[in-house]
Amino acid sequence: MRIVLVGPPGAGKGTQATRLAEKLRVPHISTGDLFRANISRQTDLGKLAKSYMDAGNLVPDEVTIAMAKDRMEQPDAEGGFLLDGFPRNVSQAEALDELLQTEGIKLDAVLDLEVPEEEIVKRIAGRRICRKDSAHVFHVTYSPPKEEGVCDVCGGELYQRDDDSEGTVRKRLEVYHTQTEPIIGYYKAQGLVVTISSLGPVDEITQRALGALKRG
């Protein structure tokens, strides 16, 4: 299957993308991984992307699209893929359509993970990270530490990252609504969108997604 995963920040896209790709036996292709891989390998595209990032600028669509094209042409993606974080806007969605048409293939579905906005704010703003080891993550509501502000694992101080603050989360949601959400309408016109609720246990959401994709 060839799937695009869409959803606001905090919808659990990364978690579900990994699980769904494994269940469907297709590679999980995320924009972040593409950037990191190209930059670490010092490819021409990686060097170009890094030059924009180092200058504090957004990487242009054409660079992101070229990276995605290169990744989708790898042997492991011949039978399908799951795109996470790409396309990020309608112009990227149009470019993806052109790429796929050139290859004589098309998307099977666009999976839209739906979460109420206040739940997203609660999920992200409640996150606390250990200063000693960032792999130790807690949540003030869903997985609180035994002692407030102290990591259960190593005793390190727990803190809230700047980009997890409520104000920053709401700004990220504004960007999502303005730039990325319109691709849902774009793909709905093609009859590709399958929407599911991203509320509940992780396993339950995965099964819900697999069932919806099968029906779609």
Image (cartoon, rainbow, N blue to C red):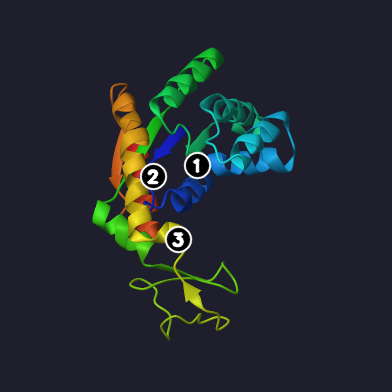
In whole angstroms, how far apart are the C-alphas of marks 1 and 2?
9 Å
Is there CB contact under 8 Å for labels 1 and 2?
yes
x, y percentage for residue 174? 31, 43
Judge the density around disc 1: few (<14), some (14-19), many (≥20) Cα neighbours within 10 Å.
Answer: some
At 56% across and 67% down in the image, what residue appears?
135
- Asked if marks 3 and 1 touch (Cβ < 8 Å), the reply is no
Position of 189 with respect to 52 (left or right) is left
What residue is disc 2 on? 210
Q: How many discs appear?
A: 3
Task: Write down the quadrant of residue 35 in the picture.
Answer: top right
The label on residue 24 is: 1
**Label 3 environment density (alpha carbons within 10 Å; few <14, some 14–19, many ≥20):** few
Question: Considering depth in this image, is 126 or 74 the residue closer to the camera?
Answer: 126
Q: Tell me, yes or no, if residue 102 can be seen here.
A: yes
For the residue pair 167 and 33, the one nearer the viewer reads as 167
**For the residue marked with disc 1, what is the amino acid?**
Leu
Q: Position of residue 14 (x, y in %)?
A: 47, 50
Question: Residue placed farthest to the bottom in the image?
Answer: 147
**Which circle's residue, 3 or 1, is located before the other in the chain?**
1
Label 1, secondary structure: give it.
helix
Residue at image position (48%, 20%) is 95
> In front here: 32 or 84?
32
Using the rendered view, name the quadrant where residue 49 is placed: top right
Q: Earlier in the sequence, mark 3 or mark 2?
A: 3
Q: Nearer the viewer, mark 3 or mark 1?
A: 3
Residue tagged 3: 162
Amino acid on which disc 2 is placed: Leu
Q: Looking at numbered disc 3 in the image, what kind of residue is underneath it? A: Asp
Q: Earlier in the sequence, mark 1 or mark 2?
A: 1
In the picture provided, is 16 more to the left or to the right than 199? right
